[in-house]
Amino acid sequence: MKVELLSVPGCGACVTLGKLLDRLAVEWPGFSHQEVDLSVHPEVASDYGVMGCPALAIEGVVVTTGALGAKRLRKLLIAHGAGPGSQEDLVRLP
């Protein structure tokens, strides 16, 4: 599953979301993500129609923009099939 973090340098929320995704890559076997620097690749922002950062895309579709906490990020990834478990696991998240 392709998960992309769309970010720009100096964005605090982008750094925080990147660290959360890095932590999940350690906790969830098989999970990975790619970070795309929109200041280097502005065409990606245009292609996705992104006007704010951070943005998270799963399988080529932006699913959220802005800051996310760890619990909401986990729920979002699982709901879109990018994390371990199933929809039923969402109710058991801490």
Image (spheres, rainbow, N blue to C red):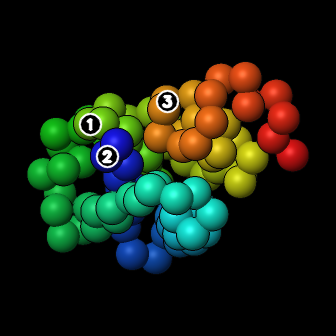
SS class of the residue under badge 3? loop
- Which three-letter amino acid code belongs to the residue tagged 3? His
Q: CA distance from mark 2 to mark 1?
A: 7 Å
For badge 1, the amino acid type reads Gly
CB under 8 Å between discs 3 and 1 = no
Residue 7: horizontal and vertical position, in percent?
38, 62
Whether residues under marks 2 and 1 lie with C-beta atoms below 8 angstroms apart, the answer is yes
Instruction: Residue 75: name its quadrant.
Output: top right
Q: Nearer the viewer, residue 74 or 83?
A: 83
Q: Which residue is mark 2?
A: 2
The numbered mark at residue 80 is 3
Q: Quadrant of residue 70?
A: bottom right
Q: Residue furthest top?
A: 88
Q: Is residue 25 above or below residue 80?
A: below
Lateral position of residue 1 relative to residue 64, left or right: left
Question: Which of pointers 3 and 1 lies earlier in the amino acid sequence?
Answer: 1
Q: Secondary structure at mark 1?
A: loop
Name which residue lies at 39% across and 75% down. Answer: 9
Residue name at image x 31 percent, y 46 percent: 2
Name the residue at 26% across, 36% down: 60
Between marks 3 and 1 in the image, the one whose residue lies nearer the viewer:
3
The residue indicated by pointer 1 is: 60
> 3 or 11: nearer the eye?
3
Q: CA distance from mark 3 to mark 1?
A: 12 Å
> What residue appears at the point 82 percent right and 28 percent down from the top-left corner?
91
User: In front: mark 2 or mark 1?
Assistant: 2
